[in-house]
Image (cartoon, rainbow, N blue to C red):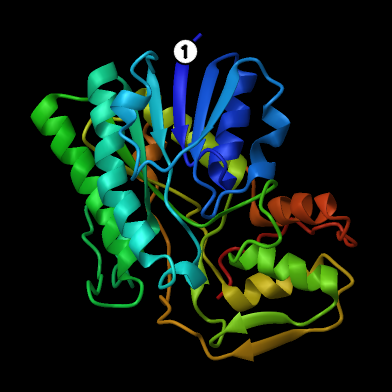
Amino acid sequence: MASILITGGAGFIGANLCRVILAEGHRVCAIDNFITGKRENIEPLLSNTRFSFREMDIVEAELAGAFENERFDYIYHLACPTGVPNLIPLAEEMMRTCSIGTFHVLDLAKQHRSRVLCASSAEVYGDPEVFPQREEYTGNVDPMGPRSAYEEGKRFVETCCAMYARKYGMHVIAVRIFNTYGPGMSLDDTRIIPQFIRSIRDGIPLRIYGTGSQTRAHMFIDDLIAGLRLVMEKGKAGDVYNVGSDKPMSVKALAELVISLTDHTAGIEYQPHFINDHCGRCPSVEKVRQLGWERKVNIEDGLSRMLTLHQLLVLAPSFATLEQHS
């Protein structure tokens, strides 16, 4: 039985990761300060004797001291405020978590001799000019732009990973996570799929910022968790891996697919974007495939699962893939 620490453990990804690891029989300690994580995400886990939770800010807390009587075999560092609407209101929190918080996590790992996986993001590529985005692509990021707190914060996380691996010989790996959705996402979440589902529930038009021609590649949470677990075990220390869907879809096509699976009649409304948006996303996943990872849940099946969860699914999906529509 391994002992595992998960920062950001009350977030959407973190809580799902806790659930999977506990099901494997390991001991899990989760940390969160609830800036964007939610207590209800971890409440079903609290009765498990192998699960413990600490409400803690990794920026403020010296983790090496806080956990001096415990030892962790693995650390998943997922903590960071998320959400496009939070890019300016929580910009300082994003930057401090990615910098000071990451140092605290890696110092704890150095003390415990833990393997570490740090969550990076597709945002490190900025508004990419290269498709698909391979790990060696250094991106197109504006360090003064409105999205820079998160973009540059995650780039700094990766720099920390590489430095600790080189300087201290630690097993530290970064994963660039692309758009992810699935059960456990609150409908209050600001990301696009829960926004669309909330609009379906409320019978109001699906809101699209811009023309809807911008593309994203959405991955079901189960596939992401499988990727994180695989990279932790088999990934090369000091390296970085994309984990995401390589089947891009325009935002407009995504909205039309969601509508096609429901009885929604309010249509779509278009509004100017409130922040500079990126035109597209599409990762190369050859590197993580070489470790044995494959995406298993297509977008129609994944959306159907979410709509069923919220009792909104009406039409069975055709399973004729729409993921490459633009």
Q: Answer left or right for 266 relative to 105.
A: right
Secondary structure found at label 1: loop
Pinpoint residue 22: horizontal percent, then vertical percent: 61, 21
> Local crowd at mark 1 within 10 Å, few (<14), some, or many (≥20)?
few
Residue 153, image x and y in percent?
A: 29, 57
**Res. 135 in view:** no
194 relative position to 2: left or right: right
Which residue ends up furthest to the top in the rendered image? Answer: 1
Q: Using the image as rendered, state which of residue 20 and residue 252 is in the foreground.
A: 20
Q: Which residue is mark 1?
A: 2
Q: Is residue 26 left or right of residue 44?
A: left
Amino acid at the residue labelled 1:
Ala
Residue at (30, 69) in percent of width and height: 148
140 in relation to 181, above or below: below
Q: Quadrant of the C terminus?
A: bottom right
Residue 138 in percent (x, y) is at 21, 60
Residue pictured at 31% horizontal, 20% vertical: 114
Q: Nearer the viewer, residue 112 or 289?
A: 112
Q: Which picture quadrant has residue 321?
A: bottom right
Q: Is residue 190 above or below residue 10?
A: below
- When the figure is inspected, residue 294 is found, relative to residue 48, above or below; the finding is below
- 175 with respect to 250 (left or right): left
Residue 324 position in % (x across, y down): 56, 66
Tell me the residue at 39%/28% (across/down): 75
Q: Say if 151 sits above or below 9 in the image.
A: below
Residue 126 sits in which quadrant?
bottom left
Residue 119 in sight in this render: yes
